[in-house]
Amino acid sequence: MSALVRPARLKMEGYFNVLAVILKTTNDAPWANEFESIELSCLIESISTKNPRIEWKKIKDGEPSYVYFEKKISGDLEGRAMIREPATLVITNATRSDSASYRCEVSAQTDLKSFDEILINLVVRVKPVVPKCAVPKSVPVGMAAELRCVEDQGFPKSQYQWFRNKEEIPDDPKTSPKFINSSYTLNAETGTLKFSAVRMNDSAEYFCRAKNDAGHSECGPQTMEIYDINIARIILGVLVVVLLCITVGLCFAYKRGYFASQKQTGNNYKAPAKGEGVDYVRAEDEGDFRHKSSFVI
């Protein structure tokens, strides 16, 4: 047993002292970045039993499981952890799945207070991966635009920053002279940058940064172009197209003969072909033709 471990006596009812096992830790809420080593300290401050039973349990989602039992590393930590005497647990290659509560338990059979435990909450921080960014390529001036940035691997959850031409965009445009004329809202929690009405000076390169306590990652820059809309020019263009269509239609109709004049009254009347055995005689009082029949025998 370590020389630092001293027998301790608990005062009971003010009359006498008894031997007891007492544990302590130097840090009950340690953290580590992913793939780094981390130490969960469990120090035996006092004990009289020479060979106490030491166990470590991992508690995640309310379910306990052994990670050190009968002097062997087991469970999730097998092959990447060890015990540092007397009872400290050292994880040599922490992963995101190691974030959990760990309980150090020591049983001392010959001590009157024969059991003690310490709960330690471990957080393994994970650096964000490269976020997925969506930037519209072109937007008409005065229209709304939304830029999106998403990253879901980092732990703790990522916060987001947007940059325009390599300069960070402030949360409030009124706090910066360069952005005071811009009308946007930036949500650092969701990664969205919304313009209510873009201006010509909003045309630039944009990129997003996802960050947390473990580090940060950025997507590549993307260009958003703002273009002007000339309403008068558009109306004039539409009128020209309409007039051109009408002209082409009239020419086509004329060539197909849809506008030819065919009057069949007065002197323009053409008598039908004379049939065999039928004589046509103009009646003086009718102004039109009538026929008489003759039969050839």
Image (cartoon, helix red, strand yellow):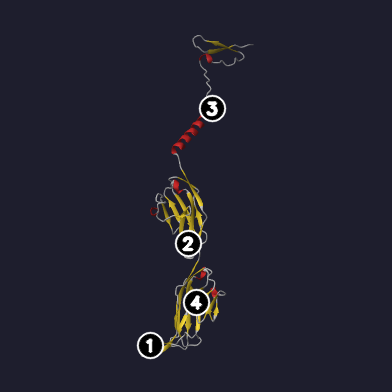
Q: Which mark is residue 11?
A: 1
Mark 4 / mark 2, whichever is N-terminal? 4
Q: Are marks 4 and 2 in contact (CB under 8 Å)?
A: no
| Residue type pointed to by label 1 | Lys
Q: CA distance from mark 3 to mark 4?
A: 92 Å
Query: Mark 1 or mark 4, which has the lower sequence index?
Result: 1
Q: Position of residue 114 (x, y in %)?
A: 45, 85
* Total labels drawn: 4
Please provide percent x and percent y for residue 283.
52, 10
Q: Which mark is residue 57?
A: 4
Q: Which mark is residue 251?
A: 3
> Mark 3, residues whose alpha carbon is within 10 Å: few (<14), some, or many (≥20)?
few
| Front disc: 4 or 2 | 2
Contact, mark 1 vs mark 2 (Cβ under 8 Å)? no
Q: Amino acid at mark 2?
A: Lys
- Of tags 2 and 3, the one toward the viewer is 2
The kind of secondary structure element at disc 3 is helix
* Label 2 sits on residue: 211
